Image (cartoon, grey):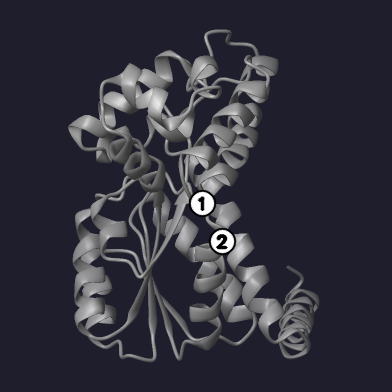
Amino acid sequence: MNQEIIFIQEGMHSFKPSEKKAAEYILRHPQEVVNLSVQKLAEKAKVSEATIIRMSRSLKCKGFQDLKLKIAYELAKPQNNLYEDIPTDDSAKSFIQTISQNNIQSIQNTLLVLSEEEVEQAVNLLSQARKVAVFGIGASAIVGMDLKQKLTRIGRWCEEGFDGDTQITIAANLTKQDVAIGISYSGQTKDVIEALRIAKESGAQIISLTKSGDNHVSDLADVKLHTTSLERDVRSGATSSRIAQLNVIDILFLGVTRSNQSKNIEALERTRKAVNTLKKTTGR
């Protein structure tokens, strides 16, 4: 199995049995698949052509041709850039290189699954929202804190829930003018799912930020943003997946800032001056 076709591997959990069968064939024979027609692949994988088209679309591809282009791009990348959760070499040089390479690879892989159309929709919703509610637990809460800090700097009303009770309380008071963003790499965090369900009942628009493929968090979303990071089962605290999520937060913030650029730049400058003044007067 080719370890570099990460966006297909991460989508496997959401495939129907026939789609999974086609995906497994692709992972075993990626070099061959980029030169096959949809009819020929269907024949070799022993599935229908419609199954391959559905699988391609579930991977956020416009069709099989688009899927082949993504596979070809992955195959063209250097084959030594694999994830390693805990390096076997205990030297400082080794873990510096390993963690840095994992983070770089995570961002590069995310470019394959992050939809430009969905990003544009998310930016529009965030720009027009009366209030933004951010839901995340654990490492995802840290990502949410980053979004809250950024939006606060440009004068946007943003609330974040770090725990289930707080998230539900915030969600229950949202309106049709508001946006809730649920952050969960697995897409299965129960507290986030419940908060988004209540936010949706309250009329808020929902944005999800999860790993690629269908999951319970993204199922509730009006706009689905995806990242990808092939971290192992033994994980050192959501490392490269968190970096990929923070990169998406930076993208969203830049988009929101550009939606009313002059006003937002003025707000950034005001907050920068206020913080600098505080540092001078307190000696911080």
- Label 1 – label 2 distance at C-alpha: 6 Å
Q: In which quarter of the image is residue 258?
A: bottom right
Above or below, 160 against 154 in this view is above
Q: Which residue lies furthest to the top in this view?
A: 89
Q: In which quarter of the image is the C terminus?
A: bottom right
Which residue is rendered at x = 64% and y = 27% of the image? 101
Q: Residue at x 44, y 49 (%)?
A: 60
Please state if 28 lies on the left or on the right of 17 as rendered. Answer: right
Q: Secondary structure beneath disc 2?
A: helix
Identity of the residue drawn at 30% across and 87% down: 174
- Counting from the top left corner in percent of width and height, residue 263 is at 73, 91
Depth order, front residue of 48/116: 48
CB atoms at circles 1 and 2 under 8 Å apart? yes
Query: For mark 1, does the 10 Å Cα neighbourhood hold few (<14), some (14 to 19), or many (20 or more) residues?
Result: many
The residue sitting at 53% across, 39% down in the picture is 65
Task: Using residue 246 as the reference point, say whether residue 208 is left or right of it.
Answer: left
Q: Position of residue 94 (x, y in %)?
A: 65, 15
Q: How many labels does the image show?
A: 2
- Find residue 26 and report its horizontal and vertical position in percent: 41, 22
Amino acid type indicated by mark 2: Ile
Q: Can you give x and y, in whole percent of width and height, for residue 61 in the image? A: 47, 46
Q: Name the residue under label 1.
A: 245
Q: Can residue 27 be seen in this view?
A: yes
Out of 36 and 217, give the one closest to the viewer: 36
**What amino acid type should be assigned to the residue bearing mark 1?**
Gln
> Residue under circle 2?
249
In this rendering, position of residue 18 left or right of residue 32:
left
Question: Considering only vertical position in the picture, is 51 above or below 117?
Answer: above
Query: Does residue 153 lie above or below 210 as drawn?
Result: below
Question: For residue 164, which quarter of the picture?
Answer: bottom left
